[in-house]
Image: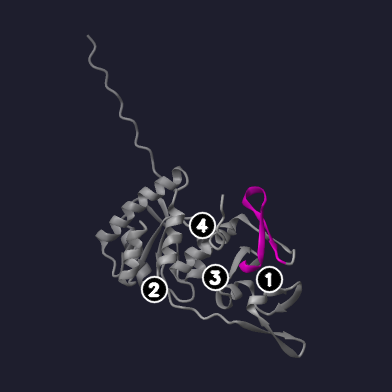
Amino acid sequence: MPGPTMLATPPVPLVPPMRTLVVDDDALARDRLRALLAHEGDVQVVDECGDGEQAARRIASLRPDLVLLDVQMPRLDGFGVVERVGSAAMPPVIFVSAFGHFAVRAFEAFALDYVLKPYEPLRLAAALARARAAVLARRGGPMLGSDARLAALLAQVQRPEVQYPESLAVKLGDQYHVVRVSDIDWIEADGNHARLHLQQRPRLIAKSLATLERQLLDPARFVRVHRGAIVNVEKIVAVEPLFHGDAALVLRDGTRVDCSRRFRDRLQGRLYFTT
């Protein structure tokens, strides 16, 4: 009689490595992280950044599976990176920081992960194990609730109070005209300049849209809705959905401003949409 049939063991599928972006303004800290990650066979460091501005651009262009993101960085910190990219578009994040105990409690409460400095290999390994599960889930489809947790974290973490100007002195000819920031309806990009729209009276200023957004405009009042447009939320009277997630914003004076899908989550963070 023939012997028992031997079932062939199915081959183990090859899992693509986690394409990882390392973000820290401290070069030595980045080197330390890279050295630790080199021992993880399924982690591929695709790039590293020394500031938040660069990190936001790299996340958009590289679309990494995982970001190891420093919380405390000059100009644009780790939370600012998440805000800039948008919580819905942000890949799974491991925050790395010597931040305070409040942040640690916030990370735990909203099911995100963190590694405190100086890095401990075992703690990093545990965070990477959770990251693997998150990355696999994301590859299989949208991670339901992940963007909501990031948004909730940003709302809970205490950050320094920033004072934004109430007025701008705009040069017109040989004079400076004072413009109340609250009177601005919307702002559009014009090359390296920006055009302020106040009751359909445009004012060109020698500041880029990115500089205005980063330094002069209160994010509680103004929201970036397009690569070339920032809108005063208080001036919006209607939102008209368009195709593919885009929308048109109707302002009080009848002006229509495009809102692209890329920035839709920022608008939803300022307006509560009922069903």
| Amino acid carrying mark 4 in the image | Leu
Q: CA distance from mark 4 to mark 1?
A: 34 Å
Mark number, residue 185: 1
Res 27 quadrant in image: bottom left
Picture coordinates of residue 8, whole percent (x, y): 31, 26
Picture coordinates of residue 190, whole percent (x, y): 71, 71
First in sequence: mark 4 vs mark 2: 2
Residue at label 2? 26
Circles 4 and 3, Cβ within 8 Å, touching? The answer is: no
Residue at label 3? 220
Residue for point 63% across, 78% down: 181
Q: Which element type, helix, strand or loop, lies under badge 4?
A: helix
**From which residue to which does the magenta span run?**
233-252
Picture coordinates of residue 73, whole percent (x, y): 43, 73
First in sequence: mark 4 vs mark 1: 4
| Residue 65 seen by the camera | no
| Amino acid carrying mark 3 in the image | Ala
